[in-house]
């Protein structure tokens, strides 16, 4: 049986099986292999077929994904590495005109239509031969049934013949041509060539989605059938390299909106995916570096903000807007002051994007600070009046002047005090896109424990409470969330002062509690066996003494950043450059845990014990 151009192994075997009136799984089993191993592209399964005189053409093998030689969770296809889930989606797509052409050439038979390998690639949206968009032909969750192409196509043959799957033709884009060239080893040299193909395509889609802000208000809602245009929009910029990308990012900042709207709104899809979905994937490191360095140079990020999923620990830049907020000075008046001092040029289109060096302007801002009323101050830190009154009653906040009566004015509050307060509680805070799994606002946590919020704030400032959240939907004090179970274990006399292994692991930034448990069981840090008050069975807990022993011996990226007031990314990079590796004396993977003495040899002594 002749193979079709670009036909996949599963399609070819399925058509062979149809010749014998059986399904692909039965046919494979009869030949002492399995269809599942053929789906994975195992060489041994192909050799087993050959022992039964079933010859698989080389062209079929070359257009089929294989797990052999690929990292875990990946497939190799046409010399490129793709995540398995991206090539093995439940929706099977194809070109109806190609399938009709198969029948026209060989006759109307149930096993002449063949599935092509390039149709598996999610970024391929067009058949270049017929200019027809790829369409979903069937959906199937079970892989062995999904890839039994002859059987599945027999169910939709009439729909293919009648034109039910036909859609409007369109011309190919530069992205379509480039992607096909990459799959057929006719690659053209451009900036994207340095990346794995899947990452390059995804970046084009991210960038294109962001660039849609020039055309529409909600670019993330673009329909799947229109993604071809989004790929092309991103490709047209990305192929020209880093300078073109940075110019495009700046162009997005010239549109409506400012940094106070958040990077997810200014850079839709791109920021979210680089900050969260692909945060640990090194294939996107260069793209992430471009966005990170661009934002560091143009965004007025302060403590409590986030940069690509990580908390900002120090303000580098102010904008006229953020400086006005910090000083209580009207934006127009402050801009005149900064212009007269030569700190800003006045060329930015808005107060929000007029940025300048925060340290350089510190003296000028301190001299220009204006005291404000209690209402303005409370609004400035994002607190309701009742929340503000509790903070004052607890001694967290105090007016700069003693009283309205002695000063003769209502303006007795210094906005800079509010800024310093927020920085002290948000240092090391993790970004929260939504509050769940035990996260509550600090005021609610205090109410549950029947204590004042000042006790929780003191615990945060004393580095006794580690899990602090910055809710993306709010600003200032309104965004300050804590993990209630941790607060309760630290502060409430009604609760056990001990932490479970899972809770302690989370509090120090160890994402997988299993690794913390392994660290304990292998004798590298202590834990105490106590009776679980609910289950009445012995259980390992981390007592205050156990926690102290852990912190005296180890650093995690989170505790390291809190102790030194630096970003964990820069510290990890410094450790790698100095040859410092994660703790693994016995070959076990304990995650990103470092011995404390190794850290202290590289960095200055921390200001806090932990």
Image (cartoon, grey):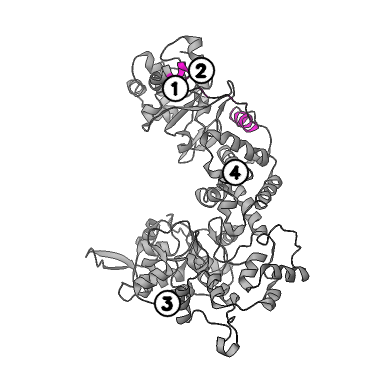
Ranked by sequence position, the earlier of labels 1 and 3 is 1
Q: Are marks 1 and 3 in contact (CB under 8 Å)?
A: no
Give percent across and percent down for residue 543: 35, 71
Q: Are marks 3 and 4 in contact (CB under 8 Å)?
A: no
3D distance between C-alphas at marks 1 and 4: 41 Å
Ranked by sequence position, the earlier of labels 1 and 4 is 1
Q: Secondary structure at mark 2?
A: loop
Q: Kindly give the residue lying farthest to the bottom in the view shown.
A: 406
Ranked by sequence position, the earlier of labels 3 and 2 is 2
Tag 4 residue: 216
Comparing marks 3 and 2, which lies closer to the viewer? 3
| Image disc number at residue 455 | 3
Nearest the viewer among 281 and 46 is 281
Comparing marks 2 and 4, which lies closer to the viewer? 4
When the figure is inspected, residue 603 is found, relative to residue 133, above or below; the finding is below
Q: Are marks 1 and 2 in contact (CB under 8 Å)?
A: yes
Ranked by sequence position, the earlier of labels 2 and 4 is 2
Give percent across and percent down for residue 21: 34, 15
Which image quadrant for residue 147? top left
Residue at horizontal 74%, vertical 69%? 336
Q: Judge left or right: residue 598 versus residue 188.
A: left
Nearest the viewer among 400 and 457 is 400
Tag 2 residue: 4
* Residues shaded magenta: 159-187
3D distance between C-alphas at marks 3 and 2: 72 Å
Comparing marks 3 and 4, which lies closer to the viewer? 4
Tag 1 residue: 11
Comparing marks 1 and 4, which lies closer to the viewer? 4
Q: Secondary structure at mark 1?
A: helix
């Amino acid at each position: 049986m002749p193979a079709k151009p670009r036909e996949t192994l599963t399609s070819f075997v399925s058509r062979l099986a149809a010749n014998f009136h059986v399904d692909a799984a039965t046919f494979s089993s009869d030949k002492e292999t399995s269809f599942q191993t053929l789906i994975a592209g195992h060489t041994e399964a192909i050799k087993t077929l050959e022992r039964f005189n079933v010859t698989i053409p080389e062209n079929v093998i070359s257009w089929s994904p294989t797990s052999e030689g690929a990292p875990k969770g990946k497939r190799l296809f046409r010399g490129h590495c793709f995540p398995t889930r991206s090539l093995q989606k439940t929706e099977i797509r194809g070109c109806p005109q190609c399938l009709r052409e198969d029948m026209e050439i060989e006759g109307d038979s149930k096993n002449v239509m063949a599935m092509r390998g390039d149709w598996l690639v999610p970024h391929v949206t067009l058949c270049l031969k017929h200019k027809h968009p790829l369409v979903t032909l069937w959906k199937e969750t079970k892989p062995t049934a999904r890839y039994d192409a002859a059987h599945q196509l027999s169910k939709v043959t009439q729909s293919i013949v009648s034109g039910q799957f036909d859609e409007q033709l369109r011309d190919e884009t530069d992205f379509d041509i480039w992607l096909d060239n990459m799959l057929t080893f006719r690659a053209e040299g451009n900036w994207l060539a340095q990346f794995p193909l899947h990452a390059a395509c995804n970046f084009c889609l991210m960038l294109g989605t962001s660039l849609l802000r020039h055309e529409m208000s909600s670019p993330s809602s673009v329909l799947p059938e229109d993604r071809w245009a989004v790929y092309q929009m991103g490709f047209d910029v990305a192929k020209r390299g880093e300078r073109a990308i940075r110019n495009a990012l700046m162009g997005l900042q010239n549109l409506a909106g400012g940094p106070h709207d958040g990077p997810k709104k200014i850079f839709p899809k791109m920021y979210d995916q680089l900050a969260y979905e692909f945060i640990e994937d090194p294939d996107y490191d260069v793209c992430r570096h471009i966005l990170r360095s661009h934002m560091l140079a143009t965004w007025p990020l302060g403590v409590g903000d986030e940069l690509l999923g990580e908390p900002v620990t120090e303000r580098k830049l102010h904008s006229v807007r953020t400086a006005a907020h910090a000083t209580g000075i009207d934006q127009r008046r402050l801009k005149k002051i900064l212009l007269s001092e030569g700190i800003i040029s006045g060329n930015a289109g808005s107060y929000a994007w007029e940025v300048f060096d925060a340290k350089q302007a510190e003296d000028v801002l301190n001299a220009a600070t204006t005291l404000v009323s209690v209402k303005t101050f409370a609004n400035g830190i994002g607190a309701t009046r009742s929340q503000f009154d509790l903070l004052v009653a607890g001694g967290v906040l105090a007016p700069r002047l003693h009283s309205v009566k002695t000063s003769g004015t209502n303006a007795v509050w210094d906005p800079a005090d509010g800024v310093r307060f927020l920085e002290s509680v948000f240092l090391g805070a993790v970004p929260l896109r939504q509050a769940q799994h035990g996260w509550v606002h600090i005021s609610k946590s205090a109410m549950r424990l029947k204590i004042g919020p000042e006790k929780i704030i003191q615990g945060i400032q004393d580095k006794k409470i580690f899990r602090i959240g910055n809710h993306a939907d709010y600003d200032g004090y309104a965004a300050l969330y804590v993990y209630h179970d941790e607060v309760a274990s630290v502060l409430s006399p009604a609760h056990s002062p001990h932490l479970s292994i899972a809770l302690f692991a989370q509090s120090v930034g160890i994402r997988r509690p299993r690794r913390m448990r392994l660290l304990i069981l292998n004798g590298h840090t202590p834990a105490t066996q106590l009776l679980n008050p609910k289950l009445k069975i012995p259980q390992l807990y981390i007592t205050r003494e156990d926690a102290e022993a852990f912190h005296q011996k180890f650093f995690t990226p989170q505790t390291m950043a809190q102790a030194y007031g630096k970003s964990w990314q820069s510290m990890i990079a410094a450790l790698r450059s100095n040859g410092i590796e994660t703790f693994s004396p016995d070959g076990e993977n304990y995650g990103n845990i470092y011995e404390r003495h190794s850290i202290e040899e590289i960095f200055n002594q921390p200001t806090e014990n932990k």
